[in-house]
């Protein structure tokens, strides 16, 4: 027995075709939106590739771009099919191609659903990429005279100002690296010599942060040097006083930004996927309803449309059997080819 069987007369078939025509053109617009979202995400990832360890994943934006382009092509074609379905003479040329087209639509919907899942699951890989990328970016902050790294200072400063963050996990990350170039250190100074000798790696480490960590909303002038030295500043206690620095790390800030971006894109893509599934189901009903017209000479006659010709278990069983037959036929062909080569060798 057919699954979800529905009776159609000529009027219902025309209304279904017209409704699907409209939905397909709306889906062309949705495809353009998905393409635009993928392009925007790709640009956003490229903009900050320097703090992503140059290993940012472009799988999701590339997939969105590809799916958006395919959606435009598929639904432009489906709109034409639905428009011609009203006229039996025009529909005749599409009739042999509609069943393979529906199979391609099912495959397209499956891939689109997987891309939607990827939008929601990208956070894990992004967090690891940002952690390593920001750490390396901070390490190269001082290399303003090194070719290939001279832009890193500006990149990190602009990042901290734009996202109101400081360091990788927090402002204390700057205490663990030498972020001031040797070019601007006075090596004749006793303080500089003592600080360099005080650690094994011979780095100039200070309890200070770059200017871009300063919070302009703070009423107090920015304290960015000697942050842990209470005596260096008037009426100051770094353990109890709220510092006039951004307290959130840039990894958390960027992760929050990209996560909200990906969640929005995932939700949009999910809505488009639901629309795609609706169109595919509608096309299946239109296809079976037109196939079921008993008398082509009488377009007014009733017909039946269905989603599946048999029940779900029977359809699945028939699918597995067809796969087995395909596998056996390939095996027989391979054995026949081997048998044909054996006498030649003899």
Image: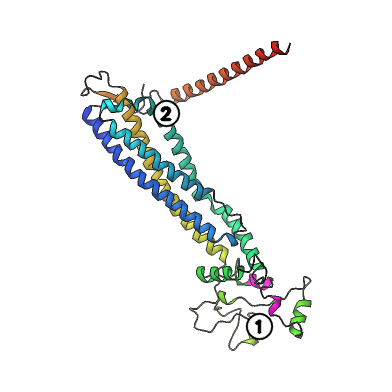
- Asked if the residues shown at circle 1 and circle 2 are in contact, with their CB atoms under 8 angstroms apart, the answer is no
Closer to us: 273 or 340: 340
**Can residue 116 be seen?**
no
* Residue drawn at 57 percent across, 18 percent down: 328
Tell me the magenta residue range.
172-188
Q: Earlier in the sequence, mark 1 or mark 2?
A: 2
The picture quadrant where one finds residue 7 is top left
Mark 1, other Cα within 10 Å: few <14 / some 14–19 / many ≥20: few
- Does residue 27 lie above or below 345 as drawn? below
Residue 45 place in picture, x, y as percent = 53, 57
Q: Which residue is mark 1?
A: 229
Q: Is residue 29 left or right of residue 208?
A: left
- Does residue 192 lie above or below 281 as drawn? below
Please give the label number shown on residue 313.
none
The N terminus lies in quadrant: top left
**Can residue 111 be seen?**
yes
Closer to us: 170 or 102: 102
Closer to us: 237 or 265: 265
Residue 282 place in picture, x, y as percent = 33, 34
The picture quadrant where one finds residue 174 is bottom right
Please give the label number shown on residue 100.
2
Q: Label 1 to label 2, Cα distance in Å?
A: 74 Å
* Residue drawn at 45 percent across, 37 percent down: 108
The C terminus lies in quadrant: top right
């Amino acid at each position: 027995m057919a699954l979800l069987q529905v009776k159609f007369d000529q009027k219902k078939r025309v209304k279904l075709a017209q409704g699907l025509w409209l939905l397909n053109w709306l889906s062309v617009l949705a495809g353009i939106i998905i393409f635009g979202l993928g392009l925007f995400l790709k640009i956003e990832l490229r903009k900050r590739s320097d703090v992503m360890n140059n290993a940012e994943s472009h799988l999701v934006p590339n997939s969105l771009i590809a799916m958006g382009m395919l959606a435009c092509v598929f639904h432009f074609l489906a709109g034409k099919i639905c428009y011609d379905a009203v006229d039996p003479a025009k529909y005749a040329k599409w009739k042999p191609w509609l069943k393979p087209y529906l199979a391609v639509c099912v495959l397209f919907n499956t891939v689109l659903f997987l891309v939607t899942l990827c939008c929601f699951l990208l956070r894990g890989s992004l967090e690891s990429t940002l952690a390593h990328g920001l750490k390396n970016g901070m390490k190269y902050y001082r290399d303003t005279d090194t070719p290939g790294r001279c832009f890193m200072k500006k990149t990190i400063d602009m990042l901290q100002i734009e996202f109101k963050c400081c360091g990788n996990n927090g402002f204390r990350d700057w205490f663990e690296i030498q972020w001031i170039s040797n070019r601007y250190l006075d090596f004749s100074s006793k303080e500089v010599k003592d600080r360099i000798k005080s650690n094994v790696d011979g780095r100039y480490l200070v309890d200070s942060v770059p200017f871009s960590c300063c919070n302009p909303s703070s009423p107090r002038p920015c304290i960015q040097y000697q942050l842990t030295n209470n005596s260096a500043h008037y009426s100051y206690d770094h353990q109890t006083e709220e510092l006039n620095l951004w307290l959130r790390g840039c990894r958390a800030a960027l992760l929050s930004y990209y996560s909200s971006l990906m969640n929005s894109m995932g939700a949009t893509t999910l809505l488009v996927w639901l629309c795609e599934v609706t169109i595919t189901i509608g096309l299946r009903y239109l296809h079976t309803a037109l196939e079921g017209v008993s008398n082509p000479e009488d377009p007014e006659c009733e017909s039946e449309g269905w989603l599946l010709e048999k029940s779900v278990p029977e359809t699945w069983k028939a699918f597995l059997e067809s796969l087995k037959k395909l596998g056996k036929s390939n095996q027989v062909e391979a054995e026949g080819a081997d048998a044909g080569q054996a006498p030649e060798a003899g």
